[in-house]
Amino acid sequence: MTTNAARRVCYQVASSLDGFIAAEDGSYDWIPMDPDIDFPAMFARFETLVMGRLTYEVMLAYEGGVNESGVYGKPTIVFSRTLKPADHPNVRVTSDDPAAVVADLKQQPGGDIWIFGGGNLFRQLADANLVDSVEVAIVPVLLGSGIPLLPKGGRMNLSLRSHQIYPGTGTALLEYDVVR
């Protein structure tokens, strides 16, 4: 983790080969839990998680997903116009503009920020030029439809930083920096 004001915002997500991060009903049971992926190290990279209401509600249903320290023990900001902050004391629920909140967060000391799921939130932050890296685990499955990696709209140019293939599941992890 970094400890200076140059916090990076990363969109790290799994995607089907045809570009969907979840099925139409929001399910993600098609994503294999590859034993070769070091999930604790992946989580350790980030100090703060940001997510939308739908992703947060999935985490609420997942045993151990939300605890007194946030989602998976990380300080978490949930963007929602419908959730009541008092009902969710373990996270910061806000209806404020995500771009303004994340821009402010990037200027504060601390470690990197993970856009945790949610193509729409990613889209808003990308449009505001706040995303620094995109890391996609491409899972070898075709869904045909679902929640897209990036909702329709503008374009984002990327530069490949690294890649890794996990032979057990055929998952390819592609890590890109955003080209500005």
Image (spheres, helix red, strand yellow):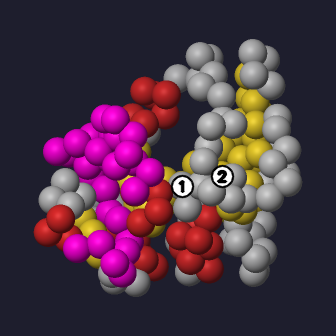
Q: Is residue 24 magenta?
A: no
33 relative position to 114: left or right: right
Specify the label residue 117 is tagged with: 1
Specify the label residue 78 is tagged with: none
The amino acid sitting under disc 2 is Ala
- At 36% from the left edge and 81% from the top edge, which residue is drawn? 81
Q: Which residue is mark 2?
A: 22
The amino acid sitting under disc 1 is Gly
Given residues 102 and 82, the one toward you in this image is 82
- The range drawn in magenta is 57-84
38 relative position to 151: left or right: left
Mark whose residue sits in front, 2 or 1: 2
Q: What is the x, y in percent for residue 176? A: 70, 50
Q: Is residue 67 magenta?
A: yes
The part of the image, by quadrant, that contains residue 87 is bottom left
Tell me if residue 91 comes above or below residue 66 in the rendering: below
